[in-house]
Image: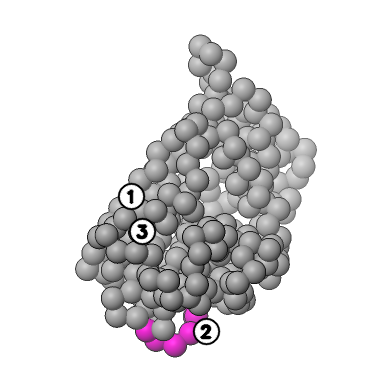
Amino acid sequence: MPGVLWADPAFLRANQYRSDTNLRARQSIYAFQRPHVDLPRAVLDALGAEGGRPLSGPAGTVLDVGCGNGNYLAELGRRGHRGLLVGLDMSKGMLRAAGGANPEAGLVAGDATSLPLADGSIDLVLAMHMLYHVPDPPAAVGELRRVLRAGGRLVVVLNAGDHLAQLRRALRDAGDELGMLAGGFGERLRLEQGEPMLRRFFGVVERHDFVSELVLYDLEPVRSYISSMISSEAMSPGRLEGYVRRALQRLSRGADGTVRITTHPGCLVCS
Ligand SMILES: C[S@@+](CC[C@H](N)C(=O)[O-])C[C@H]1O[C@@H](n2cnc3c(N)ncnc32)[C@H](O)[C@@H]1O
């Protein structure tokens, strides 16, 4: 998907995230991750461990901004979180998908850049894999900080520069071969860029990295992953097919016949 569309709220709402189909296609590739990292669990563990403080207390208020299909809401439910829990997303299709994740969670349609909440009303704000979709990330961070109570925490998840590096390289090379402008697969906002940006807003920013890899024999999951990123408006089905075929051919296999692709998200715990 061209980078400009990746941060176009109208396009994201009406196309990429009209439902959770594309997101699920991308989430399902992590079944091939070795060792497997359960990201919601790992991030919330990191949060619990940080400074020895429990997860915002049993009655803390939690807001998950850009909650998608609700993986973090579900994990909070499994942990027995009893305080007010709200998932907010700008896509109604996503909120429908999030409905089953945690029946205790309230769901609200809204935008990260103008939250329908009072100043200082939330103990813990989550912004997981979503700040790179916002046209002006610092403005969104200012808004997320506005709703935090004094002493509250913001947790941001972003991908590092080497996340899916082998796949990105294959896509770029395939695009070059076809004379396409195949930009847009790099993250608009990487973990390395998010950290200094967040330091402008918060006194303490703790970083936790989660490095692993995808190990694949069959590349069908990678095909689905790539297809989920590219809208039919951006590329005809025939062109997409040729592009994906070339990219898959460029992924090199090791001596054991597997393709290995680095995964590297990280979380930034801000207070
Ligand atoms: C990559 S998904 C991540 C979903 C979820 N946070 C997770 O980590 O599984 C990005 C989500 O952010 C939502 N989103 C993007 N921009 C947004 C904005 N400005 N305000 C609210 N939600 C937004 C999208 O609709 C989508 O559901």
Q: Amino acid at mark 1?
A: His
Identify the residue under disc 3.
47
Q: Which mark is residue 226?
A: none
Instruction: Characterize the local packing of mark 2: few (<14), some (14-19) or many (20 or more) Cα atoms within 10 angstroms.
Output: few
| Separation (CA) of disc 3 from disc 1 | 9 Å
Our reading of the magenta stretch's main secondary structure is loop
> Which quadrant holds residue 53?
bottom left
Q: Report crowding for label 1: few under 14, some 14 to 19, many 20 or more residues within 10 A (C-alpha).
A: some
**Element at badge 1?**
strand
Horizontally, residue 41 falls left or right of residue 177, namely left
Q: Which residue is mark 2?
A: 116
Going by the numbered disc 2, the residue's amino acid type is: Pro
Q: Amino acid at mark 3?
A: Leu
Which of the image's four quarters has the C terminus?
A: bottom left
To which residue does mark 1 refer? 208
Discs 1/2, front = 1
Any part of residue 150 in sight? yes
